[in-house]
Image: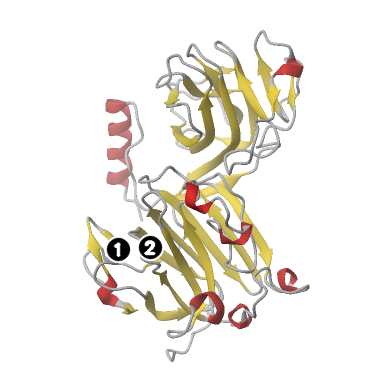
Amino acid sequence: MMTITQSLLGTLLLAATGSIAAEAPEAHEPIEIKDSEFDFVAGDSGDGSTWVYHGSAPLKTVLDRPEGESEWWDGTVIRLLPGDSVMHEIPGEFVPGDRLFVGINAMQEGSGSSDEALRVNVRASDGWSTNPARTIATGPNWRRGFAKFEFPVKWSRPGPCSVRFSNHGSAPILLDKASVSRIVRDEEGFTSLFNGTDLEGWAGNTEGYGVEDGAIRTFPSRAGGNLYTADQFDDFVFRFAFKVPPGANNGIAVRAPMGGDAAYQGMEFQVLENSHPKYAGLKDWQFHGSIYGLAPALRGYQAPPGEWNHEEITVVGRKARVVLNGKVILEVDLDEVRKNGTLSGRDHPGADRTAGHLGFCGHGDVVHFKDLRVRPVSGTKVPSGR
């Protein structure tokens, strides 16, 4: 739990540096906005319920459909010419001290200035806020960027606001898959699963895992295999942060027994660096956030390789949900997804389990995990047996 002293320190750092002080662990409460993937854009007369374009180009030319397939876009994207902007109202009531986390996929077309080109701002209903604009670097390839905002004391009044993306460069910028979430504190009841120094409370193949810079990481050169919590859980909310190098693969074991293949004897929620070319031919249920063999997740909401991602997995009864960097990328009923057989074509008896271990499924790649904490939902005591 954050103390008053920690909160004050964060405020002082914000004033001194112009950026939000790093706080861990970080939790995201998704805010769903209409048309996050830019299928429709209104002109200046828009009512704020969808994206509103401000610029000189004819509205019918603003939406574009890139060639080929990519995790970074679905359907149409929006093209912002230099000087153009697009904005969307964020539903909810916001007061000083509230924090937002904004994500967007971006790519620059042609040559021109890039690093300071894409600016993100938050606007009150009666004028621009005192938040300085954040910048998201763009380049010739698609990548996801993020910006954090904290509503200042001078925020005009409680109420809704709008997020705005502006092109301040000299080349067109394509945008897709926007996300907005509140940065919140963990609710009461969360317990840390990692002490930051060793693997106390963990079991399984401890040789293939270790601690580095306050995070659990895999050491595939020493050993492979899975690492499990010593405790078991039935219904829970599991929050953690992870980062992966290019092409890395791992997984989160859920309701799994200590032995056997967690993807079948339990459930495996994929951890994968999707953008690597070697994964171009994977099935949709193999990409990050998906339940292996059972349910596909939305793609394109992951941070670039080497950057930390914030994830939440909730499993309550027969329902499962995954939130990645403030975006709900999976929400399924575990019975419904198997009504007509599994997507893998194989039996997944682990999907019927009501309790088991949490863990990491090693697949021979280096992956880092930190800020691991869990909140049991049912309050039922789970037997300690395997």
Q: Nearer the viewer, mark 1 or mark 2?
A: 1
Which label's residue is closer to the chain start, 1 or 2?
Answer: 1
Residue at 56% in and 78% down: 264
Instruction: Judge whether 285 appears above or below 34 on screen.
Output: below
- Going by the numbered disc 2, the residue's amino acid type is Leu
Identify the residue at image location x=48%, y=36%.
143
Left or right position of 229 against 105? left
Q: Secondary structure at mark 1?
A: strand
- Coordinates of residue 55 in the picture (x, y in percent): 65, 11
Task: Residue at the far bottom: name it.
Answer: 385
Q: Quadrant of residue 191?
A: bottom left
**Quadrant including the C terminus:** bottom left
Quarter of the N terminus within the rendering: bottom left
Which kind of residue does numbered mark 1 sit on? Ile
- The image shows residue 342, relative to residue 83, as above or below, that is below
User: Residue at label 2?
Assistant: 372
Local crowd size for mark 1, using a 10 Å CA cut-off: few (<14), some (14–19), many (≥20): many
**Which residue: 69% across, 30% down?**
65
Q: Nearer the viewer, residue 156 or 345?
A: 345
Local packing at callout 2 (Cα closer than 10 Å; few below 14, some 14-19, many 20+) is: many
Q: Is residue 190 visible?
A: no
Say whether marks 1 and 2 touch (CB < 8 Å).
Answer: yes
Q: Which residue is mark 1?
A: 216
Looking at the picture, tell me which residue is in the foreground, 27 or 344: 344
Distance from disc 1 to disc 2, alpha carbons, whole Å, reads 9 Å
Task: Looking at this view, name the residue that lies furthest to the top.
Answer: 56
